[in-house]
Amino acid sequence: MMYLRLFSSAIILFSIAFLPYWFYLILILASIIIFPFFVEAIVFGFLIDILYGGGVGGLLLSPFAFGATILVFISMPVQKRLRMHV
Amino acid sequence: MALVVFLILSLVFYFSSGFILRIVAPVWKAENAFTQSFKNIGDFFSTRKTLLAENASLKARIQSLEVEMTSLHLGEDRENVLLELLDRKPEGSSVTASVLTRPPQTPYDILVLDAGSSDGVNIGDKVYLPEGPIVGVVSDVFSKTSRIKLYSASGETTSGVLERGGVPIEALGQGGGNFKIILPRDMEVEIGDRILSADIEADLLAVVEDIRLRPTDSFKEVLAKSPTNIFSLRFVFVRP
């Protein structure tokens, strides 16, 4: 599970740098659903905001990081009720 | 817990945004070079017949462009004389920059260029295509890179002029190089009409691609598109 998490983080990092946005957004969303407390998504959110957005400067100026935080926050109680076979 | 992580990371990333771009820029440059060389390898395997057909079509295109260019030069000379008379001749040299990333890699209509403050790029500078049309404005500048917000970015409103009739309009960015313009129902507009920037230079901003009008509406929706494919931009000019 740990290796899979690291592998998926590496894939997401690569896709943020080189692939279309819809590809890495789907990967991040899937990882938040699959892995417990996928805090890396917040880091990736900040990275997207820095590289392609208006930079980092608060909740509204970092929409991807803030969105990822909300999703991670929501996913925590939901995941307790889900059974994952990864 | 997630919010705590967000706050800590926002502090960390707030001070390191320029540093991160400086690290990633060489990687993007390498990617662009690799993509270009890969494309050249693909060209090597083209058949002779394909190359001959392409050659003939390119010759025809060059001829047509030469004619077009001559007519543009005449217009440009007239325009320069007028601007000199008005004492409004554009000043300052342009910076040529290579595009490191472009949509759809960037989720918004943002370009990252390999020229920054050390090359003379400043916030608010205008960005032009090599062929002349204006595409956006410099929104952030770092020492070796800069970030460009395209006029077609979603929600971005740009003042322009509809060339047919010289009507002032507001072009609302729709993303992906597209614009939406709302015009009164009776206003004359046709597919292929040009939208120019509202400043004195009147640069080409977009070309009308589609007109939507329902019998019950009092306004018509005009969809315009940037004259070039923003997904394949390679070089741009940055001018003050």
Image: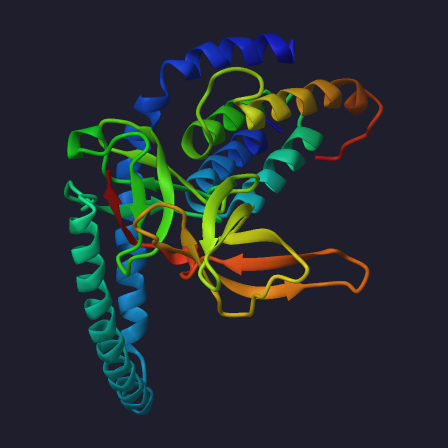
Colour scheme of the picture: rainbow
Asked whether B92 or B107 is in front, the reply is: B92
Q: Residue at x 25, y 40 (%)?
A: B114
Q: Is residue B98 left or right of residue A42?
A: left
Please, is residue B102 above or below residue A5 in the view? Answer: below
Please, is residue B55 above or below residue B13 in the view? Answer: below
Q: Is residue B171 left or right of residue B29?
A: right
Residue B119 point in image, percent of width and height = 16, 34
Asked whether A4 or B236 is in front, the reply is: B236
Residue A78 point in image, percent of width and height = 80, 23
Q: Can you name the residue that lies furthest to the front here?
A: B85
Name the quadrant of the N terminus of chain A.
top right
The quarter of the displayed image where residue B183 is located: bottom right
Tell me if residue A36 can be seen. Answer: no
Residue B13 point in image, percent of width and height = 43, 17
Q: Residue at x 60, y 65 (%)?
A: B210
